Amino acid sequence: MSGDYDHPNHPSIDQSDRTLPRNLRQTGDPGIQMLVSTRVRKSPFFDKSFNEEGAWRCTVYNRIYHPRGLVEPEDGGAMAEYEALTNTVTLWDVAVERQIRVKGPDAEALTDYVITRDATEIESMHGKYVILCNEDGGILNDPILLRVSEDEFWFSISDSTLMQWLQGVNVGMDFDVEIDEIDVAPMQIQGPRSEDVMREVVGEEVSDIPYYGLMEAEINGASVLVSQTGFSGEKGFEIYVRDATETAERVWDPVLDTVKDHGGRQIAPGHHRRIAAGILSWGQDMDHETSPFQVNLGYQVPDDKDGDYIGKEELERQKELIEDGEYPFNLKLVGLKMAGEPIRDYAPDFWLISDPETGEECGYMTSPWWNPDLETNIGLGFVPADKLEDAAQATLDDEIYENDLDLEFEVHLPDEYAEEDGEPVFATVSEVPFKESVNPSAREQAKLGAKKRAQQNGD
């Protein structure tokens, strides 16, 4: 009987370098309901988001219910939220960014051992975007790392369990640290008017916080930590509410009131904007079997870190291969600009990508969306590395992200977005970020610096 079934997972897309292939079967949205039970946690902001502000759908992120829709579809849905984010100011419930604390005399040593970047260079009351890899170089998590004091770090984690990994690493290593999840719940204030809101909420000194800087503050009698960070590409801040089970609502109410006073509202996290900024989402754009070099995070693998770290040997091996012109993976993440009707909501599947010359399926989209500023569909997707290398006429390091390429693919959009039912749309490889961030990442800063130097040299 087994021979009667076609392979459901599109085997022409080469996932042979993965132990667990991505499920590429195109099932669409079956219209199911989310079951609310005690197996999944309700954050301290749950009542505010869902019962008071009317969040109408959610996902599960880090085993916590996470609001993913505030504006109803008939009122503009996610694109109305995009407009609020890019034109005014927005509040996000991101308590799902669980805070894993490493505290003790060896906190710096353990942290330096589990991240690829140099933890010894992070000053107290500063943060940094980091990645943690396994011994095979796969990305386990890409948190914002906050150094609250000399002997205390908070890992503000993306959607994968990290506490058990850190505790497991310490078994046998015997670093003198405590590792636990703490009662801290973050919220994000994102958008052009975010600094105006924060000045009213915590005082004028918030304007002096540098990008990735931290500040102790108090809101309505509750202790909070403020950082100038965010997941949007717009100007923004995060408020980390201490003792959140008790104090979260005491902080939430005056912050949301101030946001509304400045013409804003609560929205779901702005995935449409983070895609335009080229910000990656763990689980969608990468996972534990994805190398940093596949997803343009090569800058996270330093040349000059003296200390050992998990994955160092393998990542240095991969880097050497790439520098010698041998790319060690089948697929690489790129930006794509796509034809078709505007994609105004989350994709329920990894939509397939084909080679227009052969018609053969060869890759898949991870994060597509419509961008009203560019007036086109954009997205991130994995495509064959060898085709990129041919088009770029260069080794496949992070420079592949730096330019538009004269290279086309076809994307198999659902009929609601396709130009013709059942027919793919054309897509071209695009420079990323599609839209510059207000606060550029380290990779963007390096790119902008290279462009400036080239202009100065007349290149």
Image (spheres, rainbow, N blue to C red):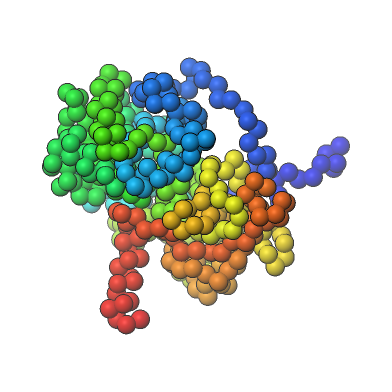
259 left or right of 309?
Answer: left
The residue under the point 34% across, 55% down is 437
Q: Residue furthest bottom?
A: 458
Q: Is residue 301 left or right of residue 344?
A: left
Tell me where residue 440 sits by quadrant. Answer: bottom left
Taking depth in this image into account, of 427 and 126 the one nearest to the observer is: 427
User: Does residue 398 lie above or below 64 as drawn?
Assistant: below
Q: Quadrant of residue 98?
A: top left
The C terminus sits in image quarter: bottom left
In this view, the residue in front, 50 or 289, is 50
Nearest the viewer among 89 and 160 is 89
Residue located at (70% from left, 54% from top): 420
Q: Residue at x 45, y 34 (%)?
A: 71
| Residue 394: x %, y % from top left | 50, 73
Residue at left 34%, top 47%? 87
Residue 445 image position (x, y, % from top left): 31, 61
Give the image location of residue 325, x and y in percent: 51, 71
Residue 1 lies in quadrant: top right
Q: Is residue 288 visible?
A: no
Q: Between residues 138 and 280, which one lies in front from this camera angle? A: 280
Horizontal side of 255 relative to 3 (left or right) equals: left
Residue 26 seen anywhere in this rendered image of the structure: yes
Task: Give the total of numbered labels.
Answer: 0
- Relative image position of residue 374 (x, y in whole percent): 46, 58
In the rendered view, would you say 37 is above or below 122?
above
